[in-house]
Amino acid sequence: MPMPVFPLELEREIIILAIDCMQQAYSLLFVSQRVRYWIESLLYRKIVLSNENIAISFLSSLRIRCQRSGDFARGIVKSLCIEGDVLLSTAAEILSLCSGATNLALWIAPSDFNGTTNPLLQPLNNLPLMSLSLSISLIFRYTEFVSLGAFKAFSTVTHLKILNGWVLWNSTIGLEYLDRLTHLCLHIHTQRTKPDLVASLLARSHLQVLVFCISEDINAVQTFLEFNSLSDSRIVLVSQVPTAWGEFGGGDMSLWKDADQVVDWRRTSTQGGPFGVPSSDIIHF
């Protein structure tokens, strides 16, 4: 009896669905040229670079593949998490090659500036970003700009998480002018956050979800918001935000998914008030 022949797309889906760890993925690289391309598409689609050595090795791998196909990195890498002690110059080169990435977490410190030019700005501005997580100190260092609206990189972003705790202490840094922004995650401090700056963000009708990371008692934060007439069903309070991307790079999508569930539940529920949340067996932060 002849072996059944599956359509290529179905064969690809079967192989991809069967992979549940990196070890399995690597073992399939040498099955055939066709399967190798499918596996490389999986391995390179979401990349986590946790230190400079790993980032340099990744760069070397990209250069080899880009020699064979100039559009390899641009076409295949869609999500990037760069963290730890990765140098800005290394990160800038990676972003230049992976110019098709739409999801970026930039969790590094500005440790190797050697002049007055920020090497990240140009490659960042060339990315078609939709989801971005970063410390904005990386952006404002050695630039004359004080508003995120001045940076092309933010013009396409719909989901933004800013790690700096001081945002909304004295300025919105232009967040209200990011017209495509629908999901925003910031820190809130009852002694430092300016209520009128929060109100200016909530006044933007396109903002669907505003997540606040809190380090204080949740009741104190809710009281602060209610006292300042900031009770809004779009506000979601979380005590901690998951940062691990996992083997294949989970990004911040679980944060946004859970926050969306909370806001959607509030729209249809008559329980819990503006800060109510569904039962804990449904939502996990």
Image (spheres, helix red, strand yellow):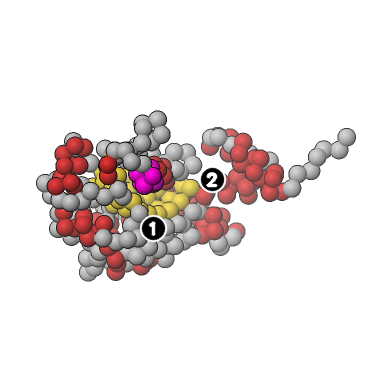
Give coordinates of residue 7: x percent, y percent: 74, 48
Extreme-left residue of the structure? 191
Q: Secondary structure at mark 2?
A: helix
Left or right position of 223 against 132: left
User: Can residue 266 be found in the magenta stretch?
Assistant: yes
Q: Secondary structure at mark 1?
A: loop
Asked whether residue 169 is in view, the answer is no
Q: Quadrant of the N terminus?
A: top right
Give coordinates of residue 238: x percent, y percent: 28, 40
Tag 1 and tag 2, C-beta contact below 8 Å: no
Extreme-top residue of the structure? 281
Q: Which mark is residue 103?
A: none
Extreme-right residue of the structure? 1
Q: Which mark is residue 43?
A: 2
Nearer to us in this view, 30 or 44: 44
Residue visible at 16% across and 42% down in the picture: 223
Residue visible at 36% across and 31% down in the picture: 280
Left or right position of 248 against 213: right
Q: Which mark is residue 158?
A: 1
Left or right position of 172 against 279: left
Amino acid on which the number 1 mark rests in the picture: Thr
Q: Quadrant of the C terminus?
A: top left
Give coordinates of residue 16: x percent, y percent: 61, 41
Nearer to us in this view, 125 or 214: 214
Region of the chain picked out in magenta, as a range? 263-268
User: Can residue 217 be found in the magenta stretch?
Assistant: no
Q: Is residue 9 above or below residue 171?
A: above
Overall secondary structure of the magenta stretch?
helix
